[in-house]
Image (spheres, rainbow, N blue to C red):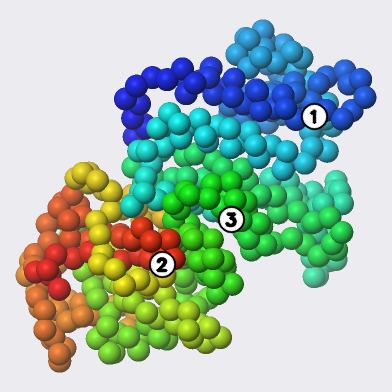
Amino acid sequence: MPLPTPKTRRHLSADGLCRTVRAGLERILDERPQPQISLRDALLSAFAMFSLKDPSLLAFDARRHDGNLQQLFGIGQVPCDTRMREILDPVDPERLRPVFNDVFRGLQRGKALEPLVFHAGCYLLALDGTGYFSSRTVHCDSCLKKTNSRTGEVTYSHQMLGAVLVHPDFREVIPLAPEPIIKQDGTTKNDCERNAAKRLLRKIRQEHPHLGLIVVEDGLASNAPHIRELQDLGMHFILGAKPGDHTFLFEKLIAAYDAGRVRTLSWKTPGGGLIEVCWTHDLPLNEANPGLLVNFLQYTEFDAKGNPRKTFSSRHRPEDHPPQRVGSGPRRPGSLEDRERNLQHAQESRLSIRAQLRTRRNEPVGGVRHADDAGLSGRSGSATVLPAVSSRLAEVWQQACVVGQPAFPLPTLRLHLPAASV
């Protein structure tokens, strides 16, 4: 679904955004004496290559004599692929951050970011690492090094941590300046994604001190130092969690299940399957940090035979305020599944809490059924009845939705259920 554009603004058109980028790149000082090709032209050529989605520098090189390229992007002289590398390799990525901020501020002023607000004025900020260079022969002083323990062979690589604003209803994303994961000056140890995330999030908060953010990351980020860093920066968060990586957390989850503290909501899908959402609050993060409490949520899709097809688990900072509805307006069918795909990394062949902790009962899907807090019928202490849930996700969204609250010191995720369901 494309971002809605209620009113065309000249500075938000393709030409206007190119002018913004060009003006920002022109401010980067070229320190080379009497260059044949300016740094400005090399940077604009790289920008053009990515804008035109060429698969490689060599593919872009084939069109560098096209006059339309100079006209569209304002490039004076397009370097060949080898020359472009020679010019751009020494450029510190930090010098490009102001250009990203120029574009972001233009989108803010033009109200183009407003449709991307996810909840309570906050945007979803997805972080993930990626590699963009690897070689066993070519390397530099900043390369990460990985030595094969069996052969002793060394692989050199460069990686980066990307950060983009996302929304489950839109295919477009808004990139912020990435953070290189490279060996830092004056160090002999490899850099890592955790350190890069610490640097990147601090820079983002410094550049956007009042921007409401919900940081979305995979299980690598589910550790106490990172969570405390997010809290200190005033950022909400949704972090993945896997049983193999968080044994203590899942043990406490089993204890919460036995104590009747795990809630479950399930509904039938149009194809005859089942979607199940389980959640609980105030679980200790790990044995070393018992005072750091998190919320836990697990989403599972079952096929028509009752076999788990897709599962993801996440954890979140608890809060004491009433849950609130996320988003605005009715949700389209499929939107809840879109959220699952966009917010979490799917863990294939994982079992739901109910399947992990208790034998799954063969009972009809859908309709009214008795359930205790863990969603299992027939157990002692069962005190609630879950109403029939329509297979249409637009209606289901009224009964189960991701929530948070706007106060920065208390990032959270919760499910909102109507009073008749709890």
Which disc is residue 410 wearing? 2
Q: Residue type at mark 3: give it.
A: Leu
- Residue visible at 40% across and 32% down in the picture: 111
For disc 3, the marked residue is 201
* Amino acid at dot 2: Leu
Question: Looking at the image, do the residues carrying marks 2 and 3 touch, with CB atoms under 8 Å apart?
Answer: no
Residue at 27%, 90% (x, y): give it. 259
Front residue of 112 and 259: 112
Spot the residue most to the top.
67
Lower position in the chain sequence, tag 1 or tag 2: 1
Mark 1 lies on residue: 29
Taking depth in this image into account, of 48 and 32 the one nearest to the observer is 32
Q: Position of residue 384 (x, y in %)?
A: 11, 79
Q: Which mark is residue 66?
A: none
Circles 3 and 1: CB atoms closer than 8 Å: no
Is disc 3 surrounded by few (<14), some (14 to 19) or many (20+) residues within 10 Å? some
Residue at (35%, 38%) from the top-left corner? 115
Does residue 333 appear left or right of residue 195 in this picture? left
Q: Is residue 124 visible?
A: no
State the quadrant of the C terminus: bottom left
In this rendering, position of residue 419 left or right of residue 342: left
Q: Position of residue 90 (x, y in %)?
A: 83, 38
Instruction: Report if the CB atoms under discs 1 and 2 are less than 8 Å apart.
Output: no
- Where is residue 187? Give x, y as percent: 84, 62
Query: What residue lies at 61% left-to-right and 56% top-to-bottom?
Result: 202
Which one is in front, 1 or 330? 330
Figure check: 52 above or below 419: above
Mark 2 is surrounded, within 10 Å at the Cα level, by few (under 14), some (14 to 19) or many (20 or more) other residues, namely some
In-front residue for pair 370/10 = 10
Q: Amino acid at mark 1?
A: Leu
Inter-mark Cα distance, 1 to 2:
42 Å
